[in-house]
Image: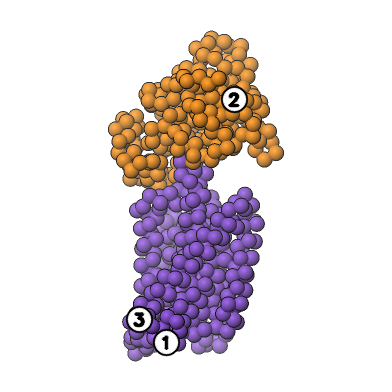
Chain colours: A orange, B purple
Amino acid sequence: MADANNVLEVQEIHTFIGQFHILEGVTVTVSRGSITVLLGRNGAGKTTTLKSIMGLTPPSQGSIVLEGQSLMGRRSFTIAQMGVGYVPEHRAIFRDLTVRENLAIVQRKRDDLERRADFIFGLFPDLKRFYNLPGGNLSGGQQQMLAVARALVPENRLLLIDEPSEGLAPVIIESLIEAIRRLSAQTTVLLVEQNFRVASILADRYVIIDDGRSVVSGQMQDLVQDEALVQRYLGVA
Amino acid sequence: MQRTRGTYMLILTLTAGLLVFSFVTSAGDLGSFGTTLLSGLFLGALYFLVASGLSIIFGLMDILNFAQGAYFMIGAYVTYSLFHMDALKGIDVNLRFPLGVLAGTIIGGLLGAVLERGLLRPLYARPIFQLVLTFGVAIVFGEALKAIWGTEGYGWSTVTSFGIHQSQFEIFGRQFGSYRLFVVAVGVALIVLIGLLLQRTRIGIIIRAGVEDSEMVEALGINVRAVFTMVFTLGCAVAAFGGAIAAPFLGANLGMGNAFLLPAIAVVVLGGLGSYMGTAVGSFMVGLAVAVVARFASEFLNQTVWASITPMLLLILILLLRPSGLFGKESR
């Protein structure tokens, strides 16, 4: 039974990539206005879960429901148009396009960027300074900010953010944490994060994925207290 | 930045080398030098019209469309036929040629859309199959043209609009056809127009982004398959347009497709796969090289084959110096 408070309900999805059975039963529920983090070791299936929700690696079984509408069998552009923003790992910004073009490409309405500019540049002031520079000229941290900003141009119902802190300097990570916290006031976030400290600061809820299955979920504050669980699935002391 | 400077130096050096070679072998005959230069620009404009579609299609869709030369041919045959058709002789001659070009371009574009939607789309997961398919389609188109128009080539026999086909102008004492200059002007105009489309419009931003990462473009809410169809259609239409405007000078014959496809492939690779700038610059470099070698070979060697293999020789030379082409990405 769908809960009206949930933005996203993923039930027992199975995903194959080629002949490999990557997800063997992942269940994730994301409630409105929350930040939920997917945790797990490398290769556990976290990124594939986000890609499956996004329709990039479509699941063969299970169900994915966004505010009452099934996402199963839909192409990724339709899923994006339904209000799911995606920030992939390794940023995937368009290096030859300027910052402005990287943001403008996502506009659904002609004035989306103009309307959201104050909010976006309030979060990431650097992007305003480098507005007409190619994305490839930005630092790693600025590229990550651009990738997040790009997902904020349309008013999405849900943001999927994959490993935002990967490869960034600590000082950049701190400003990114602050930005994600502020943007979560406007939209619901499903995050993949390897950095347990970052995850514990940001997330309200967690889901641990192990060997392609969701194994434990709950409140983030409970996980932080449970060293044994953290050690068992994440190898973090 | 250093690489870009090196690229421009290489372009300048090669171009200057060709010009000096042409000037020296002209033995100071400025008329011969001038007409060779204009012939190079004429060929460059036509190579661009075939290669631009090839380059954008490859950059966005990773499809090397071997049928691109066939679309050039279709444009030429359709325009030739409509212009010379008895039933249309009543239409003002100044109107008949533009109408023929328009019809050739539209038919080329429509056939491009049919190829992409009907045959290529089911094979997106199988790039090798796509390659073979476009090769097969090129053969089918060639056979279809043969069935409709026969194996004899057609030479443009009557006046074109505004008499431009017949008029000549003099350059250092040599006569040069105004029509070829018109084709150069059209080629340059197309370079600017397509450049503006890519740089200044939303669809242009989407195409350039798609050249980098089409999966990500789709994940941002853009129907990439629809963009693929549009770009493929546009690429084929531009090639057909090239054939259409070349027809008054080259006529329509079954050899013209391959004659322009192979240099166009060389242009796309030496310019840097997927680079529009590389395609524009490469087209004129190849055109100039072919014209210079053609004149030299016909005057001194009496062997025209050198002109045919010049695009490939230039390609080899540039790839030895720049393995990813003039403006290509290192990673491609």
Q: Amino acid at mark 2?
A: Gln
Q: Are marks 3 and 1 on the same chain?
A: yes
Q: Quadrant of residue B10?
A: bottom left
- Please, is residue B327 above or below residue A187 in the view? below
Q: Chain of mark 3?
A: B
Residue occupying the far bottom of the picture: B173
Query: Where does the image place residue A46, in percent across and percent down from the top left?
Result: 58, 28
Q: Quadrant of residue A147?
A: top left
**Which label was assigned to residue A196?**
none
Instruction: Give the Cα separation between the discs numbered 1 and 2.
Output: 72 Å
Compared across the picture, whether A149 is left or right of B256 comes to left
Query: Where does the image place residue A210, in percent across and percent down from the top left?
Result: 64, 23
Residue tagged 1: B158
Residue tagged 2: A11
Can I make out residue A24 in this image? yes
Q: Secondary structure at mark 3?
A: loop
Compared across the picture, whether B327 is left or right of A103 comes to right
Q: Chain of mark 1?
A: B
Can I make out residue A202 in this image? no
Q: Residues within 10 Å of mark 1 (few under 14, many from 20)?
A: few
Residue at x 35%, y 77% (from the top left corner): B95
Q: Chain of mark 2?
A: A
Residue at x 43%, y 75% (from the top left corner): B100
Q: Amino acid at mark 3?
A: Asp
Residue at x 59%, y 15% (from the top left corner): A230
Please state which of the two labelled residues, at mark 2 or mark 3, is closer to the viewer: 3
Query: Where does the image place residue A156, in percent across and percent down from the top left?
Result: 42, 32
Q: Residues within 10 Å of mark 3 (few under 14, many from 20)?
A: few
Residue tagged 3: B92
